[in-house]
Amino acid sequence: MSKKQKTVYTCNECGAAFQKWLGRCPECNSWNTIVEEIQNTSVFKNEILFENSIHPLSQIMSESIQRIPTGIGEFDLVCGGGIVPGSIILLGGEPGIGKSTLALQVAQHCTTLYCSGEETLQQIHLRSRRLNIKPDSIHLSSVTDIDHIESLIRTTTPQLIIIDSIQTLYSREITSPVGSVSQIRYTASRLADVARQTKSCVMLIGHITKDGSIAGPKILEHIVDTVLYFEGDFTRDYRILRAFKNRFGSVNEIALFTMTQQGLSEIKDKNKLFVQSHDASYPGSVISATIEGTRTILFEAQSLVTATSFTNPRRMADGFDVNRLNLLVAVIEKHARISLNSFDIFINVAGGFTIDDTSCDLAIAAAIISSLKNIVIPHSTGIIGELSLSGQVRSASHTLRRLTEFLNSGVTTIILPRSNSTEISNTGFTGTLIPITTIAELTQILQHL
Ligand SMILES: Nc1ncnc2c1ncn2[C@@H]1O[C@H](COP(=O)(O)OP(=O)(O)OP(=O)(O)O)[C@@H](O)[C@H]1O
Ligand SMILES: [Mg+2]
Ligand SMILES: [Zn+2]
């Protein structure tokens, strides 16, 4: 194998490579993200024999996926049932959200090599004491040279290798600086190879900022098997871990934790987490249910509709897409014949949870009407359904799951699409169903609750 040097220009945002420098990346449209990098490319000579490189699909022996449960139920749930030997996981999130904390908590359940280029070993020791981590199976290292790490992995063969963070690793074969796209991509793919060969699991920790920028996680997504991102609001103590890609499980699952002095703790009563004032009903507040993977979560949508002092009334939403809100407002105006152009409208999903589920449209619309008309919708009433542009109420998905969760939480009256109500009527469901077909009907019903 001979080596030759070549200069390329790579985008720090998306990893695209170009022959010359550009102010704006044509791939992802980001400005000033393209940097010069020297690459050593390996050129294979023709005499390398490629025998044994083709295998008939029918003769591949099937191996069932072995999983190692980590003892943290929520983490196992998003991984698809535990960590998979030979796989590589990317754990991304904003600085300070709890990546190192989670990694250390997972580490105590396996034989682990924890490579930290971010913090000193003393800092990790202090954290492990605070988190009450069983130290026996964990070995720490502050090595960041990929060759050195690879030999550590091959000699000690741990079940789990934690790299905190991938931005601190480097290879002497790559001339570009630590943290650059080339370094990150190269060291990560080396680790992916080592993981596959040694049947250990590698967890890469990567930083991202709020807008998802900074070299790293984005360009790694296709190298790794599983991408987990931490979300959460720093003003609140809970954290959501979401799978964005998973070669070994569903990407619909979320894990819910609270951040405490002793680290991340699993939330027991998850379904009611995002309902704040379950007993006190007031105008503008509506209970609904959303689906996240195998989990059904009850939440409270809050709306405030007030006379505006602007020529363009304000539309603001926290935990809900503001474009969807504008659309719902237009549907209410046109099909329920309620004029909203002289009102500011604010929507908030209690607890800071984010709803991305069109089956919750009707609940948001109901919250707006409830606030505007000063109607109290009792919290014993739940609302589900999607709204179409024509003002029709469309079927919600997973209706029975949502309804069952309502009943479990004492929500016994449910306003729902008529199409769903016929489907539910044969299931022996014991709650009171109020079926509707249009947004205009919703207004009528709310006034007589
Ligand atoms: N003594 C403490 N009591 C309670 N919570 C703490 C304590 N110390 C730290 N935390 C929590 O832990 C969080 C930091 O966690 P951690 O270091 O795991 O984050 P990280 O994502 O690894 O951050 P970084 O990107 O800086 O490495 C803090 O934001 C805080 O919420
Ligand atoms: Mg950290
Ligand atoms: Zn780009």
Image (tube, rainbow, N blue to C red):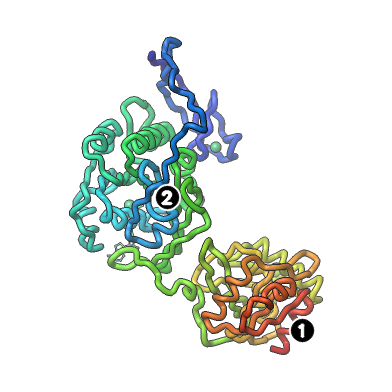
Q: What amino acid is labelled 2 in the image?
A: Gly
Q: Nearer the viewer, residue 189 or 246?
A: 246
Q: Position of residue 124 (x, y in %)?
A: 23, 53
Q: What amino acid is labelled 1 in the image?
A: Gln
Q: Which residue is mark 1?
A: 444
Q: Position of residue 11 (x, y in %)?
A: 51, 35
Separation of marks 1 and 2 at Cα, in angstroms: 47 Å
Residue 314 appears in the figure:
no
- Above or below, 390 against 177 in this view is below
Q: Which mark is residue 424?
A: none
**Numbered disc 1: secondary structure:** helix
Query: Which residue does the image show at 56% across and 65% down from the upper left?
Result: 291
Residue 179 in which image quadrant: top left
Residue 63 appears in the figure:
yes
Counting residues from the start of the chain, the first of labels 1 and 2 encountered is: 2
Mark 1 and ligand 1: say if the CB distance to the nearest ligand atom is below 8 Å: no
Direction from residue 277 to residue 382 in the image, left or right: right
**Numbered disc 2: secondary structure:** strand
Q: Position of residue 220 (x, y in %)?
A: 45, 40
Specify the quarter for ligand 1.
bottom left
- Above or below, 376 against 213 in this view is below
Q: Which residue is mark 2?
A: 92
Q: Quadrant of the N terminus?
A: top left
Q: Quadrant of the C terminus?
A: bottom right
Q: Nearer the viewer, residue 360 or 420?
A: 420
Q: Disc 1 vs disc 2: Cβ atoms closer than 8 Å?
A: no
Q: Position of residue 63 (x, y in %)?
A: 42, 41
